[in-house]
Image (cartoon, grey):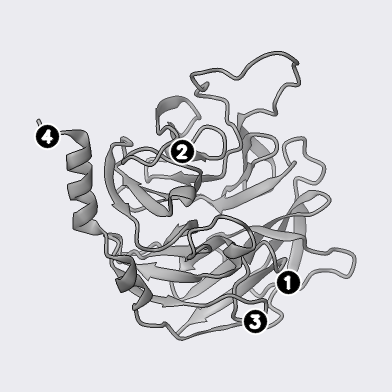
């Protein structure tokens, strides 16, 4: 039997390109649609934390400033409603995703909860719960399978199994069945193959493989559906956000919000988005630092339901941009 590290390194070599090849990837032409989202006069957007679309093209924006809020817009960017106003679990936003049945899921780093809304906007499932304030109780050495420590993102496979990146505190990925029953967890803090250091974003492909943006290790790790390690892509900088497009030919998008290998928010203003094949081959890149239209200021989430029309949320610029790739 080959040592695990040797197998992992061989797998990584088979998939990953060198950083130089990524930097030299062709530029993809694109433009940003001006004034796309239309907020009512009395509502203002805070930090652009999350963005996702449903099958009708409706857009869900998860934002935080003085309060965490979840808004819905139609496909033309017109405001429809707010979901979960005053909800106990909305404390400090981190990600929003929409599943194949148009349920809306939010991952809240502050409440340690993953909350599922049905399309009508009613809460139908909760994973995790808010921290209990108890003095003198040390954290558990073995994380509880049903408790999170600052989770970051959520994904699903075609069977409806749920995958949560339990990012800042536990450095792991947890798998549940469609009803929320624990199945498996993988990961511990570190830089070895299969370890994680701030798993910040997660996506699943049509085969059920799981792609984890291992932000502080500046790499994407790939696991199979049973959370067995497959590969490392360490050639696209620090992946703050990953997204996999649907359809017969899937693409992997990753925001390199930190090409200088420094994880401060100031450095994170520099970066581009890579478009890749699922094996990690970089097809092209687009964007650069800045706050003007068509520039990026810390991309935190990408929606790629349409692989040629992306939506990106940005923390520092407090906005969502609609990008049309040519």
Q: Nearer the viewer, residue 3 or 250?
A: 3
- Evaluate if marks 4 and 2 touch, with contact meaning CB atoms under 8 Å apart: no
Residue 254 horizontal/vertical position (percent): 44, 63
Helix, strand or loop under label 3: loop
Q: Nearer the viewer, residue 3 or 312?
A: 3
Q: Does residue 228 sit above or below 216 in this rendering?
A: above
Tag 1 secondary structure: loop
The first of marks 4 and 3 along the sequence is: 4
Percent position of residue 164, x then y: 49, 39
Residue lying furthest right in this view?
42
Residue at 68%, 72% (x, y): give it: 77
Image quarter hosting the N terminus: top left
* Label 2, residues with CA under 10 Å away: few <14, some 14-19, many ≥20: many
* Residue 117 seen in this snapshot: no
Residue 273 position in % (x across, y down): 47, 70
The residue where tag 2 is placed is 162
The residue labelled by disc 1 is 78
Spatial CA distance of label 2 from label 1 is 31 Å
Q: Is residue 53 left or right of residue 130?
A: left
The mark closer to the camera, 4 or 3, is: 4
Query: Which quadrant holds the C terminus?
Result: bottom left
Report the residue marked by disc 4: 2
Question: Alpha-carbon distance for marks 1 and 4?
Answer: 56 Å
Label whose residue precedes the other's in the sequence (2 or 1) = 1
Disc 2 or disc 1, which is closer to the eye?
2
**Marker disc for residue 293:** 3
Q: Nearer the viewer, mark 3 or mark 2?
A: 3
Q: CA distance from mark 4 to mark 3?
A: 51 Å
Q: Earlier in the sequence, mark 4 or mark 2?
A: 4
């Amino acid at each position: 039997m080959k040592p695990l590290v040797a197998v992992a390194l061989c797998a990584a070599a088979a998939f990953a390109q060198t950083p130089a090849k990524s930097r030299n990837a062709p530029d993809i032409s694109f433009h940003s649609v001006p004034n796309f989202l239309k907020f009512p006069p009395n509502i203002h957007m805070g930090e652009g934390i999350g963005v996702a679309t449903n099958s009708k093209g409706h857009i869900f924006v998860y934002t935080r400033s003085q309060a965490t809020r979840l808004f819905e817009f139609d496909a033309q960017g017109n405001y429809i409603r707010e979901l979960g106003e005053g909800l106990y679990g909305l404390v400090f936003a981190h990600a929003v995703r929409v599943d194949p049945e148009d349920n809306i899921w939010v991952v809240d780093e502050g409440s340690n909860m993953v909350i599922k809304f049905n399309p009508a906007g009613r809460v139908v499932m909760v994973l995790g719960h808010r921290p209990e304030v108890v003095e003198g109780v040390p954290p558990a050495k073995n994380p509880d399978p049903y408790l999170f420590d600052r989770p970051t993102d959520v994904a699903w496979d075609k069977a409806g199994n749920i995958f949560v990146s339990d990012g800042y505190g536990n450095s792991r990925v947890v798998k549940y069945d469609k009803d929320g029953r624990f199945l498996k967890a993988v990961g511990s803090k570190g830089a070895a193959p299969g370890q994680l250091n701030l798993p910040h974003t997660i996506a699943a492909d049509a085969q059920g493989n799981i792609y984890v943006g291992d932000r502080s290790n500046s790499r994407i790790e790939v696991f199979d559906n049973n959370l067995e390690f497959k590969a490392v892509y360490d050639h696209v900088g620090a992946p703050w956000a990953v997204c996999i497009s649907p359809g017969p030919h899937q693409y992997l998008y990753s925001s390199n919000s930190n090409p200088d290998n420094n994880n401060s928010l100031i450095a994170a203003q520099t970066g581009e988005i890579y478009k890749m094949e699922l094996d990690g081959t970089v097809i092209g890149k687009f964007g650069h630092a800045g706050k003007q239209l068509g520039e990026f200021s810390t991309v935190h989430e990408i929606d790629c339901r349409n692989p040629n029309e992306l939506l990106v949320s940005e923390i520092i610029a407090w906005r969502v941009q609609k990008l049309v790739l040519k």
